[in-house]
Image: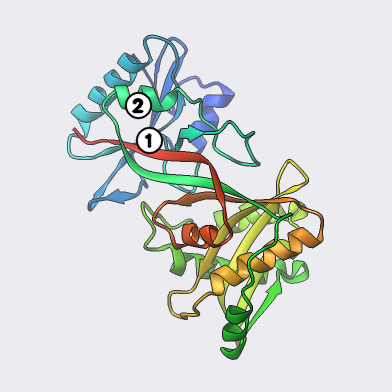
Amino acid sequence: MHIITPASNLSADQQAIFNQGASCLLTQQDMQIGVWLENTPEHGGTAIIAIGACLLDGEGAVDFLKECIVHIGVEHPERPIIGPMNGNTWMKHRLIIESNNRPAFLMEPMEPAFLFDIFRSAGFETLSRYSSSVIDLTEVQPSFERVEKIVAKQGINIRQIDLKNFDHDLTQIYDLSLAAFSNNFLYTPLPKQAFMHSYVSAKDRIDSEFVLLAFQGETLIGFLFCMPDIDPSVLIVKTLATSPDHRAAGLGTLLVAHAHQRAKDKGYSEAIHALQYESNSSLRISQRFNAVRFRTYGLMMNDD
């Protein structure tokens, strides 16, 4: 096993991994594991070690992964090792546990199917599960008129993002994200500058009709971010958040219903509810729309 550090003579691909905060790369022939030691999430009150940027294949993959775990464990015996994850959940993470072989959607983390067996054979267990599901928009959609009336009575208004005041709306979305996601599993806050840059750089690809903001007075209390897929007939429902300080029953469902209707009116035939944590309330919302699961993902942990 060879250890590559940021001071090594790096390829462009290796430099890109270190640019994501990796502490080192462990390599053997054509195989590779990235190791993140700093600025990682906590699990059970202890900062984890994240392993990602995995290039594992062939008969020696399991033994190589085991050797990497032993090496990491000698230096950091009290810290659980979680992967595949490039440092935190804002970056590429998860592997595929089950799939019906539907083609990948835009920005879906598609690790090779055999990676799950390699991790499991190396002593890892599934720590958390996620799924992606699809809704057929050509079918009659559920009615949420009662929820619409309840939300309206609370003085809540829904509008699309204002591209002319993009930075202002993004700042409110960022602030709400911090509040809404702070208790999420393996959550780490993303610096505001990085958050803003990721969305500003994608501004030209955003369809403002599918970024919905819910306000109570001047306060943003919910948002839904959707984006067109590579397949022009498919809309990806990517991020949903509601304020923990403003309980508005059914608001999340209503935002999704509005996005579905807009998509249907614009000729989309399917909506993908992407990468949902299995214990998340958004998964229950998907079930209200008769979603059909097509992929299950997992994060794996080794804490021996």
| Residue 51 at x, y percent in the picture | 38, 33
| Residue 241 at x, y percent in the picture | 52, 66
User: Residue 288 falls in which quadrant of the image?
Assistant: bottom right
Mark closer to the observer (2, 1): 2
Q: What residue is shown at x 41% (from left), y 34% (from top)?
A: 84
Question: Mark number for residue 119?
Answer: 2
- Label 1 sits on a secondary structure element that is strand
Q: What residue is shown at x 58% (from left), y 31% (from top)?
A: 101
User: Residue 1 falls in which quadrant of the image?
Assistant: top left
Q: Is residue 208 visible?
A: no
Give the mark nearest the N terminus, 2 or 1: 1
Along the viewing direction, whichever of 181 and 155 lies nearer the viewer = 155
Q: Badge 1: how crowded within 10 Å, few (<14), some, or many (20+)? A: many
Q: Is residue 165 visible?
A: yes
Along the viewing direction, whichever of 120 and 10 lies nearer the viewer = 120
For badge 2, the amino acid type reads Phe
| Residue 282 at x, y percent in the picture | 49, 60
Q: Which residue is mark 1?
A: 83
Q: Mark 2 and mark 1 in contact? Answer it, CB < 8 Å.
A: yes
| Residue 95 at x, y percent in the picture | 45, 34
- Label 2 sits on a secondary structure element that is helix
The vertical placement of 85 against 164, above or below, is: above
User: Residue 152 falls in which quadrant of the image?
Assistant: bottom right
Q: What residue is shown at x 28% (from left), y 20% (from top)?
A: 66
Q: Residue furthest front?
A: 140
The vertical placement of 230 against 181, above or below, is: above
For badge 1, the amino acid type reads Gly
